[in-house]
Amino acid sequence: MPATETSPIAEDRAHVAKQERELIFPHFNADTAWSLGSTLRAFAIERKLPVVIDIHRFGDPDQQLFYTALQGTIPDNARWVLRKTKVVARFHRSSYAAGLYLQEQDTTFEQKYSLPEADYATHGGAFPINVAGAGIVGCITVSGLPQRADHELVVEGICAELQLDYNAFKLPVQQ
């Protein structure tokens, strides 16, 4: 069923669009990736979250700048990271935004784009690294929680790294 303007899907889509539009790094390098990844890892350890955290810079070839798998993760989490990251690399949107769009359209990724779901995952948790003056240069991905929580952990980490108020960017509480 397509979403209405007041649906939780439409509400999340609007918030994610703001996140993608406004969460912009002034620069991004290996040190930034380490700082952000370490912040996300500290959040996850403090909260006892079983997640994989991955930060990639796009290129030919891509470069993995940060990776950690915490207690409670399984090998499938690494595969989810790859599939979510491919969505961001292809569409320069968060994997959660892509999934919400498909839900609104009442279609699947494979139906809409003829791309195999075995290789692409439109589930929350992968977010584009947008750099002022450069555009999308990479992706931050978390896997291991429900998709909305994966997405939110990434956004919280970006806000911490950019010294922005996370409360101004977090998704609304769903009823």
Image (cartoon, grey):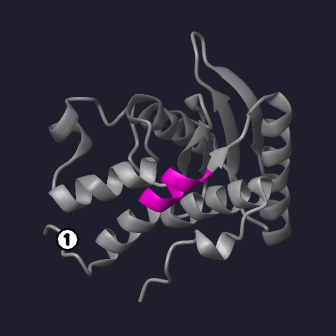
Q: Is residue 64 left or right of residue 13?
A: right
Q: Secondary structure at mark 1?
A: loop
Question: Where, quadrant-wise, is the N terminus in this rendering?
Answer: bottom left
Q: Residue at x 16, y 51 (%)?
A: 107
Most extreme residue toward the bottom is 175
* 46 is higher (above) or lower (below) than 65: below
- Residue 71 shows in this picture: no
Most extreme residue toward the top is 60
Q: Residue at x 36, y 33 (%)?
A: 118
* 155 is higher (above) or lower (below) than 27: below
Does residue 19 belong to the magenta stretch? yes
Task: Identify residue type, mark 1.
Answer: Ala
For the residue pair 162 and 117, the one nearer the viewer reads as 162
Could you say which quadrant of the image residue 49 lies in? bottom right
Q: Position of residue 147 (x, y in %)?
A: 49, 60
* 61 is higher (above) or lower (below) than 53: above
Tell me the crowding category of disc 1: few under 14, some 14 to 19, or many 20 or more residues within 10 angstroms, Cα based: some
Could you say which quadrant of the image residue 40 lies in? bottom right
SS assignment for the magenta stretch, majority: helix
For the residue pair 142 and 35, the one nearer the viewer reads as 35
Q: Position of residue 41 (x, y in %)?
A: 81, 53
Q: Is residue 168 left or right of residue 95?
A: right
Q: Which residue is mark 1?
A: 3
- Residue 43 shows in this picture: yes
Q: Residue at x 46, y 37 (%)?
A: 88
Q: Is residue 147 left or right of residue 57?
A: left
Q: Residue at x 44, y 47 (%)?
A: 95
- Give the magenta-colored segment's residue range: 17-23
Q: Position of residue 47 (x, y in %)?
A: 79, 71
Question: Where, quadrant-wise, is the C terminus in this rendering?
Answer: bottom left
